[in-house]
Amino acid sequence: MWQEIEQIEYDIYRSSMTSSEPTSRILYFYPKNQEESAVSLDLDDVKNTSFNELHQEISQLAPHIKWLFP
C-alpha cells in the first residue's frame, strides 16, 4: 500500500478567527498514479494518535513519501 503513495499533504483548516469551532487537521494521500484521486483522512477521526506519531510511523514504513506542510 505505502509504495503506491507519492506524497502526503498535512493541512490545517480554521473556520474563522472568532469562531468557537475547533480546527480541522487533514492528511491528503496522493498516489503515484496521477489518474487516481487523493484520499483524505481527518485526524480528528483517528483516536489516541497525534500527527507527530503518525508522521514518525509513516516515515519509518515509507521513507520515499514526500511530505507537504502548511
Image (cartoon, grey):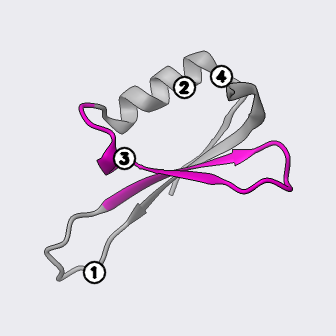
Residue neighbourhood size for the residue with mark 4, other residues' Cα within 10 Å, grouped as few (<14), some (14–19), many (≥20)? some
Instruction: Return the residue at label 1.
Output: 16
Instruction: Return the residue at label 4.
Output: 62
Q: Secondary structure at mark 4?
A: loop
Q: Position of residue 37 (x, y in %)?
A: 72, 57
Indicate which disc residue 58 carries. 2
Lower position in the chain sequence, tag 1 or tag 4: 1
Tell me which amino acid carries mark 2.
Ile
Mark nearer the viewer, 3 or 4:
3
Whether residue 21 is situated above or below residue 43 in the rendered picture: below
Q: Position of residue 33 (x, y in %)?
A: 85, 46
Please report the bounds of the magenta region as a residue range.
Answer: 24-48
Lower position in the chain sequence, tag 3 or tag 1: 1
Instruction: Return the residue at label 3.
Output: 43
Tell me which amino acid carries mark 3.
Leu
Looking at the image, the residue that sits furthest to the top is 60
Q: Position of residue 65 (x, y in %)?
A: 69, 33
